[in-house]
Image (cartoon, grey):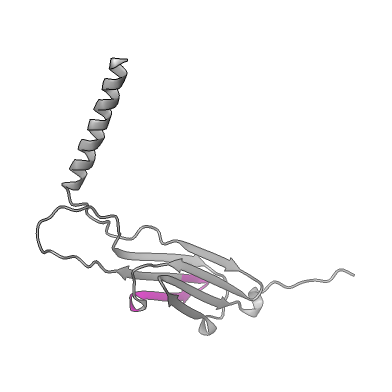
Amino acid sequence: MNCVVSTKRNRGLFLDEFFDNLRTYKVVPSSSLNLTKINLEDNEKSIKVTAELPGMSKEDINIEYKEGLLSISGEKKSEEKEESKQKYYREISYGKFHRTLSTGDVKFEEAEAEYTNGVLTITLPKAEKSRPKMLEIK
């Protein structure tokens, strides 16, 4: 029994030491944002793309369309402060991102984009030729 208790105690000390050491190093953010989360809704008349882009301004987001591909890109800028050499831990990512989605033929000139509370919503009306056509059975 002493062996088990001792092992648990050592494991606890190891974890305490691990987290203490973690606080002593500056965690460098990645050069690009993690994969931007996107929802895609396809209905009869349009395609709706919703992307989570928290902490960005709409001026830092680019939306492009070419040959059936919708590209969303931008950069989340860091607000680094070099006041002192204090130790800290950071999980928030900063940097550039780029997502490309296949949308098929859409009327991009009639598309609408809205950015509210960190969520980008793009509505792309479908071109007539890409809308589903029904054939009635006689």
Which quadrant is the N terminus positioned in?
Answer: top left
Choose between 39 and 1: the one closer to the eye.
1
Q: Identify the residue at image location x=31%, y=69%.
A: 75
Question: Which range is magenta?
Answer: 59-70
Choose between 130 and 43: the one closer to the eye.
43
Q: Residue furthest right?
A: 138
Residue 101, percent from left and from top: 49, 66
Choose between 134 and 111: the one closer to the eye.
111
Residue 126, percent from left and from top: 60, 77
Q: Identify the residue at image location x=41%, y=72%.
A: 117
**Horizontal relation, residue 46 to residue 133: left or right:** left
**Horizontal relation, residue 80 to residue 114: left or right:** left
Q: Is residue 84 above or below residue 75?
A: above
> Does the magenta segment cover residue 69?
yes
Which quadrant is the C terminus positioned in?
Answer: bottom right
Q: Identify the residue at image location x=27%, y=59%.
A: 31
Residue 5, percent from left and from top: 29, 21
Q: Residue furthest left?
A: 84
Q: What secondary structure predominates along the stretch shown in magenta?
A: strand
How many numbered badges does the structure rendering display? 0
Q: Quadrant of residue 73?
A: bottom left
> Does the magenta segment cover residue 75?
no
Q: Quadrant of residue 17?
A: top left
Q: Is residue 49 above or below residue 112?
A: above
Q: Residue furthest bottom?
A: 109
Q: Identify the residue at image location x=27%, y=29%.
A: 11
